[in-house]
Structure formats: C-alpha cells, structure tokens
Image: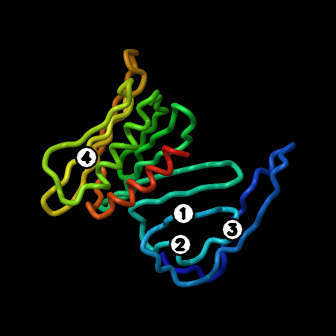
Amino acid sequence: MKSPDSQHLLRVGDDRPGSDMKRRWRSLPKAAIEADWVDAVDLTREVPSSAIKPRQPAISFIRCSHSRLLVFSIHSTSSTRELVFSAHKDEFFRVEIKGFEVSASADVWAYTDANGLNEFFQELGHLEKRWQGQRSWASIDREFSLAATCTSLGKVTFRVTLLGLQGAPEEWRVEAGLVTDFGQLKKIAKHAGVFFNE
C-alpha cells in the first residue's frame, strides 16, 4: 500500500440522535509508511505514519478510548487469514476467523478459563526455542478451541476450531489454520495479556 496522494479523513464518534459523543475529525498524514507492525492506535489522536505498515501486520491491537473497544488480532503470514478477538466483557468474548476462503465467528463463554487462554499465549511467548508436538486450549463448552504447532524452520500454525448450535439439527463446525512466525509469539503474548486483562 503506497502513501496516498491526498490525505484521508478519519471520523470517530457516534452521530446517532441523542448521543452526547462529539464527532472528531482527524487527518491522516501524507507520509512514508515504514513501521514494522501496528502496536497501538488511539483513534482520538492523529495516527502517525510510523504506526502503519505497507503490508499486513502480523499482529494488530486497536483501542478506542470513547467506546472502550479493544480488538486483538493475529494475521497470517501466508495468506489473508486473520484471527480476531473482540468484545471482551466479564466471562465472554467474541472470536472470528476470516480471510482466505473462510469466515466464521462465535461468542465464547470462557467462565473462569479466559485466563487459561491468556496463559496459553503467555506460555508460547516465553518459549526460547521451537517445540515439538501440539499445545492447545479449549473453552469450557468447546465452542472455540485453539492448537499450536511449530516446524523446525520456525513456522507456527494455529489450528482454529469453532462450533455452533451444538446438539441442534443445524449444528456447524469450522476448522482453519493460520500461519505465523515463531518470532512473533512474544508480541502476540503481550497483546493477549492486555486484551484479556482489560
């Protein structure tokens, strides 16, 4: 993605009737885009050119201070697939796998095990070397499970499984892989820690 010839405008705010949230307009700067990855973007401020990458980042983390929206996502390094975590509140969060030939989402009731998923990411982030075998986590009702494997070359594959309408005639199941690099696990763990502890 090249720097645009003209500046883009970003609007933050809720203009529905009765809303007390003011509109804010900010101009995205016309500048070279060189950052390694998106760390954090506060949508109430101007977005610096150094916070945007020309290609899809391995991890992204977005916070909107007005609505307290928090989104944590992991991008595939091999395709357009993306694993997105959002809407974390109390014992619930939303997970979505989307991109190359797949699109599915589920609202996950983690009960006390949301911290277990965070610990899963933290354990991966603290690994000093590639591992053999599979490491996995699953929600208490099994509507979402995540497994990770690593090759000798440092390619990490997350195997995402989502289930819906369990026990019903139209029960569904989606399973998809998402590839990232071993070197990204520390950053993934960092952002998972912020998301699940918000």
**Image disc number at residue 148:** 4
- Check if mark 1's residue and mark 2's residue have beta carbons within 8 Å: yes
What's the residue at 46%, 32% (across, down)? 108
The residue drawn where x is 33% and y is 62% is: 184
Specify the amino acid type for callout 3.
Answer: Arg
The disc, 2 or 4, on the residue closer to the chain's N-terminal end is: 2
Q: Is residue 7 left or right of residue 166?
A: right
The residue shown at (38%, 24%) is 141
Q: Which mark is residue 51?
A: 2
Q: Earlier in the sequence, mark 3 or mark 2?
A: 3
Question: The disc labelled 2 sits on which kind of residue?
Answer: Ala
Disc sitting over residue 40 in the figure: 1
State whether residue 10 is above or below residue 81. Answer: below
Q: Amino acid at mark 1?
A: Ala
Mark 4 or mark 1, which has the lower sequence index?
A: 1
Q: Nearer the viewer, residue 18 or 115?
A: 115
* Measured Cα–Cα span from mark 3 to mark 2: 12 Å
Point out the tag, 1 or 3, that comes first from the N-terminus: 1
User: Where residue 117 sits: x, y (%)?
Assistant: 38, 40
Identify the secondary structure beneath mark 2.
helix
Q: Residues within 10 Å of mark 2 (few under 14, many from 20)?
A: some
Q: Secondary structure at mark 1?
A: loop
Dot 4 falls on a residue whose secondary structure is strand
Cα distance between the residues tagged 4 and 3: 36 Å
First of labels 4, 3 by sequence position: 3
Q: Earlier in the sequence, mark 1 or mark 2?
A: 1
Q: How far is disc 4 from disc 1 in space, using C-alphas? A: 25 Å
